[in-house]
Image (cartoon, rainbow, N blue to C red):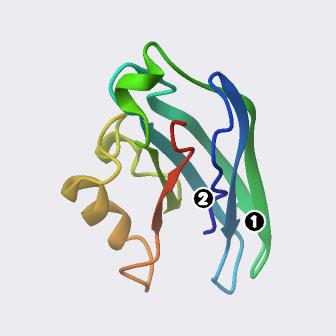
Amino acid sequence: MPLGGYECQTIPDPKDIHVRIQNQSDHTETIGVYTGITAPSGCTPNGRIIQTSVTLSASRTANVFVLGLPFDCVNPSAVSGQKWTIVAVADVHADDLPSCPTGSLPGLACFNALADDDTHDTGNSRSRTCCRVP
């Protein structure tokens, strides 16, 4: 599940965020896609940026996008060099949203809920840093 990563050139700086999802099973699946972002102090966006589901045939892929998401800081010089962290998860059967509420994507309850959905206990999430404050 790749995540796009970028460097901010200026503040504010709109960015496109994309998450690629692949159905690795031998049958059609509905997959929940939840993506959250943690910003440096005083910066936005911060919180859930994607909460949707896709239905994919066996071995198919799909891309989920947020286009033109504005990255901004109240006081960029106070957080210069810091980055946003993006966490995206794929929820096979799209049934674990209650265990993965906003702000919990890297959490143990979410991880455990996602791990019991398929034959792969890992690989259901990705984390990347993005957009360093200039």
- Residue at which label 1 appears: 56
Q: Which residue is depicted at the point 68% across and 87% down? A: 26
Which is nearer the eye, 37 or 27? Answer: 37
Seen at 73% across and 49% down, the residue is: 64
Left or right: 75 in relation to 56: left
Give the x, y percent position of residue 59: 75, 82
Mark 1 residue crowding within 10 angstroms, few (<14) / some (14–19) / many (20+) = some
* Label 2 secondary element: strand
Three-letter amino acid code at the position of disc 2: Ile
Q: Residue 31: x and y, percent?
A: 60, 59
Residue shown at the point (34%, 45%) measured from the top left = 100
Please count the marks in the image. Answer: 2
Q: Nearer the viewer, residue 69 or 40?
A: 40
The quarter of the picture where the N terminus appears is: bottom right
Judge by depth and name the residue closer to the eye, 100 or 30. Answer: 100
Q: Is residue 134 above or below residue 96?
A: above
- Please state which amino acid type lies under the numbered disc 1: Leu
Q: Is residue 101 above or below residue 2?
A: above
Distance CA(mark 1)–CA(mark 2): 8 Å
Q: Residue at x 45, y 12 (%)?
A: 74
Q: Position of residue 117 (x, y in %)?
A: 41, 70
The residue closer to the viewer here, 88 or 118, is 88
Label 2 packing within 10 angstroms: few (<14), some (14-19), many (20+): many
Task: Say which label, 1 or 2, has the lower sequence index.
Answer: 2
Which mark identifies residue 31?
Answer: 2
Regarding mark 1 in the picture, which secondary structure is present there?
strand
Question: Where's residue 35, x and y in %?
Answer: 52, 45
**Quadrant housing the C terminus:** top right
